[in-house]
Image (cartoon, rainbow, N blue to C red):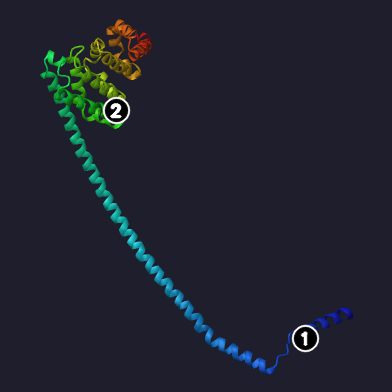
């Protein structure tokens, strides 16, 4: 017990000694003075810095609020201008569509007038006349428009009068006459047929199947070639073929297509042979 009591007492003496440090009076006075100075000046310095910081924060928040207001105002302006732009674009599209419809209506009327104005002799002659070249140029424009997806859609949606006119004129002109004009119109109809809606419209037009057989009797190889291409469009689309199969099967100029498959024109021969294979589907449609 004494040993333990003695140890505790020794520890207490050691702790007591560690609590005191000898400092010279002069140093203590100087330290006291410095502490007093810090006690006077530190709050002023700290309070000034904090106040300045808060003032800066207030200024930043105020600027941010102004910026947010400016951004909101700009957003409203953007929405306004976007609405005006969309309206202007819609008006522009309507105007362009109206002009295009008018152009193709005039084109159809010009083509029809041209064909009606020609005698049999003039159809064989005057192929280089200004009037003939002008009509061919119009037909070429239609062909190029129909070569574009948007053009095909426009023609079948807004210019069906032109499609009707071309089919009518193709049936009106005798074999061997105005072949360049026929070829351009057939190319236009084929391009339109790439659009399913266009193919349905063309194939369901009265007299379309007899028109194809009529064109296949043309002595011009290019006319026959493009007539076969248009026929192939119908055969290769099941939905369209289902409506035309019966009429085709009953009126198909099979021997004429066989003859074309032996043509000296390599392109016509190849397409006719290909079509003969495609036509076998009619046997299953019976």
Q: Position of residue 181 (x, y in %)?
A: 21, 20
Q: Position of residue 197 (x, y in %)?
A: 29, 25
Q: Can you identify the residue that label 1 sits on?
A: 17
Assess whether mark 1 and mark 2 are in contact (beta carbons under 8 angstroms): no
Which residue is found at the position 24% from the left and 42% from the top?
90
Label 1 SS: helix
Q: Quadrant of residue 166?
A: top left
56, above or below 150, in the image: below
Q: Quadrant of the N terminus?
A: bottom right
Q: Residues within 10 Å of mark 1 (few under 14, many from 20)?
A: few
Q: Quadrant of residue 4?
A: bottom right
Q: Can you identify the residue that label 2 sits on?
A: 147
Whether residue 176 sits left or right of residue 118 in the image: it is: right
Which residue is found at the position 36% from the left and 63% from the top?
67
Q: What is the spatial separation of the Cα atoms under label 2 and label 1, in whole angstroms?
A: 107 Å
Q: Position of residue 223 (x, y in %)?
A: 26, 15
Q: Nearer the viewer, residue 165 or 29?
A: 165
């Amino acid at each position: 017990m004494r040993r333990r009591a003695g140890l505790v007492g020794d520890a207490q003496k050691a702790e007591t000694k560690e609590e005191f440090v000898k400092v010279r009076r002069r140093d203590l006075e100087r330290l006291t003075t410095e502490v007093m100075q810090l006690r006077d000046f530190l709050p002023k310095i700290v309070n000034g810095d904090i106040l300045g910081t808060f003032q800066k924060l207030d200024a930043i928040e105020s600027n941010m609020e102004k910026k947010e207001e400016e951004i909101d105002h700009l957003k409203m302006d953007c929405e306004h201008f976007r609405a005006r732009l969309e309206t202007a674009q819609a008006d522009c599209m309507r105007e362009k569509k109206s002009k295009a419809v008018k152009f193709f209506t005039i084109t159809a009327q010009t083509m029809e007038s041209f064909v009606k104005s020609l005698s049999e002799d003039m159809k064989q002659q005057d192929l280089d006349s200004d009037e003939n070249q002008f009509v061919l140029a119009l037909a070429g424009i239609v062909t190029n428009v129909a070569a574009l997806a948007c053009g095909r859609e426009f023609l079948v949606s807004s210019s069906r009068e032109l499609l009707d006119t071309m089919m009518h004129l193709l049936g009106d002109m005798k074999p061997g006459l105005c072949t360049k004009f026929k070829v351009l119109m057939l190319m236009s109809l084929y391009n339109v047929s790439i659009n399913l809606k266009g193919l349905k419209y063309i194939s369901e037009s009265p007299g379309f199947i007899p028109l194809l057989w009529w064109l296949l009797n043309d002595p011009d190889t290019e006319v026959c070639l493009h007539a076969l291409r248009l026929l192939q469009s119908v055969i290769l689309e099941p939905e369209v073929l289902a409506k035309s199969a019966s009429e085709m099967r009953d009126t198909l100029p099979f021997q004429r297509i066989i003859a074309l498959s032996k043509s000296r024109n390599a392109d016509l021969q190849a397409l006719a042979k290909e079509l003969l294979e495609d036509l076998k589907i009619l046997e299953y449609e019976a």
